[in-house]
Image (cartoon, rainbow, N blue to C red):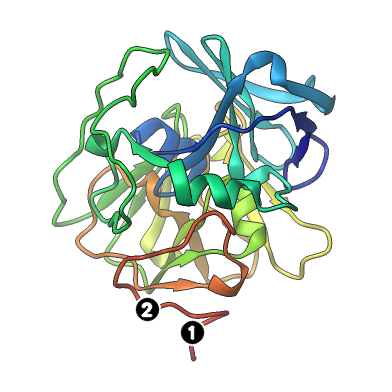
Amino acid sequence: MIQGACLCGSVRYEVEGPLPPLMHCHCSMCRKHHGSPFASFIAVPAAAVHWLTGDDALIDHRSSAARTRRACRTCGSVAPAAVGDRALVPAANLFDDENALSALNALHALHAFVGSKAPWHVIADGLPKYDGAPPDWPLAQVEHQVNAPQQENDHGSCLCGAVTFTLIGAPDRWFQCHCSRCRRARSAAHASNAFYATSQFAWRTGHELVRNYKLPEAERFTVAFCTRCGGAAPVERDNVPFIVVPASLFDQAPNMHPQAHIHVASKAPWYTPTDDLPQFAELPPA
């Protein structure tokens, strides 16, 4: 057994082995749900997931005719969900004490739905890549549209489209964050956070649907999610002069790219960034 939990700890489960290879999914719906460049799953038989607590306290969102996505109602972390006769379990929420997932990633992991990947994200490892579904995937492929860059104001939205917002200009900073809190909150290998001044940001619709969750033991760490779909949302805090926007919420390809990987000393043992961006063990120099 390997255990998993959401960021707040109210949703807990066990996954019965043996563990299958990791799948890094780049489809637009996974990116919107997690707020990250891609989601990383293990696909196990549905009966291999044993709920300990919190299975009755989840947001269930029907993202397509064949797929329901699940997230914790308190903190927004993505929870295991059925896909056909399997369950997709987010790797970032597993307690990988024996580094079992690390070994699977090195040997057998793959990238799926790369044809829908974020245009600003670079896949630089040597793992197999599939433009659509990988072999033996139990569901039909859903086509995704990649929009062209906008020259003026950009827009963003959550997975279900109820939460929308406008962005003016480029973010002051844009980091791929590998800290353990971002990984557990986004249920992904790392977060991709764009920092905009409050004057560059405006809510369009659905602000009332956004819930913030602040980790009690953290001085500042806060995440936000849509209470309708469980998808990531911008983080707005009182008396803070900037908004943190999960980059995968962009509806158009921005005219820039992430600037660096940060907190790499805390990265997932099963994922190593291999692109050309600068890497910092913690935060970059001021």
Q: Is residue 144 above or below residue 179?
A: above
Q: Which residue is at a point 74% across and 48% down the rendered structure image? A: 95
Counting labels gives: 2
Q: Judging from the image, what secondary structure is the residue with disc 1 in?
A: loop
Whether residue 249 can be seen here = yes
Whether residue 224 can be seen here = no
Q: Nearer the viewer, residue 243 or 122?
A: 122
Crowding near the residue tagged with mark 2, few <14, some 14–19, many ≥20 C-alpha atoms within 10 Å: few
Q: Residue 235 in the image: x percent, y percent?
A: 56, 55
Q: Is residue 38 above or below residue 199?
A: above
In the rendered structure, the answer to whether residue 41 lies left or right of residue 185 reads left
Crowding near the residue tagged with mark 1, few <14, some 14–19, many ≥20 C-alpha atoms within 10 Å: few
Q: Which residue is at a point 41% across and 52% down the rendered structure image? A: 202
Q: Which residue is at a point 78% across and 34% down the rendered structure image? A: 1
In the rendered structure, the answer to whether residue 209 lies left or right of residue 21 reads right
Is there a contact, CB below 8 Å, between mark 2 and mark 1? yes
Q: Amino acid at mark 2?
A: Pro
Q: Residue 78 in the image: x percent, y percent?
A: 61, 35
Residue on which the image places disc 2: 278
Residue on which the image places disc 1: 284
The image's mark for residue 59 is: none
Q: Quadrant of residue 46?
A: top right
Q: Amino acid at mark 1?
A: Pro
Q: Which residue is at a point 53% across and 36% down the rendered structure image? A: 41
Q: Residue 85 in the image: x percent, y percent?
A: 56, 9
Q: Residue 60 in the image: x percent, y percent?
A: 62, 20
Q: Nearer the viewer, residue 204 or 80?
A: 80
